[in-house]
Amino acid sequence: MSTKNIMIVGVGGQGSLLASKLLGQLLLKNGYDVKVSEVHGMSQRGGSVVTYVRYGDKVYSPIIDKGEADVIVSFELLEAARYMEYLKPEGRIVTNTQTIDPMPVITGAASYPENLVEKMQSAGAQVDAMDCLSLAVEAGSPKAVNMVLMGRLSKYFEFTDAQWEEAMQAVVPAKFLEMNKKAFALGKQQ
């Protein structure tokens, strides 16, 4: 199979690293060659964070160039729009509708852009946007946004729930497993 490319984008502290580990584990367990990049960005300071997950028969590099991403998974709406140029034509964006003001908005130097979902759709992206934060809270913690997003992403893969759960058990600490499974299920059901 040809190499597939997934970008996971968000703001530091949202759980994108665990999401990329889960996806990498799932793909490895199912026989793919997988490359997962390190987290790029100011993850410790609430800045923009990007992780690349590439998989296929043979993957030589963890880097995704502009116009190559099959899917962008975004933890925050503006981050989805910011990385649109990496999406393939007719690629898919799976995004949380949560907004987190970047520093220029906080300082009053800029305003948060409006109608981002519509703008991304107008640019040709297939956008699957949902309020992952409220579902994460329903599951037991606002920190479970990552698993809500992975549940939503799972709708576009042919892996079974059991395969996702096996990967989850490998990367999620046992004391948080049930909550994360619930968050995953809520994301998938919406």
Image (spheres, rainbow, N blue to C red):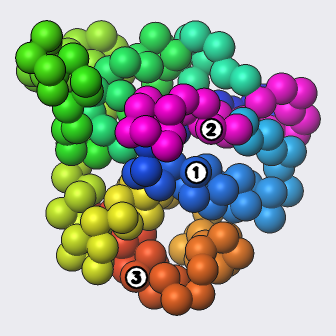
Residue pointed to by mark 3 = 179
Whether residue 63 appears in this view of the structure is yes
Please tell me which residue lies in front, 28 or 12.
Answer: 12
Q: Residue at x 49, y 43 (%)?
A: 44
Q: Is residue 61 magenta?
A: yes
Magenta span of residues: 38-62
Q: Give the alpha-carbon distance from disc 2 to disc 1, as whole Å.
A: 7 Å
Location of residue 139 by image quarter: bottom left
Residue 110, numbered label: none
Q: Tell me the element at label 1.
A: helix
Question: Nearer the viewer's eye, disc 3 or disc 2?
Answer: 2
The residue that disc 2 covers is 39
Q: Earlier in the sequence, mark 2 or mark 1?
A: 1
Residue 11 showing in the rendered view: no
What amino acid type should be assigned to the residue bearing mark 1?
Leu
Amino acid tagged 2: Val
Residue visible at 25% across and 24% down in the picture? 103
Mark 3, residues whose alpha carbon is within 10 Å: few (<14), some, or many (≥20)? some
Name the front one of labels 1 and 3. 1
The answer to which of marks 3 and 2 sits earlier in the sequence is 2
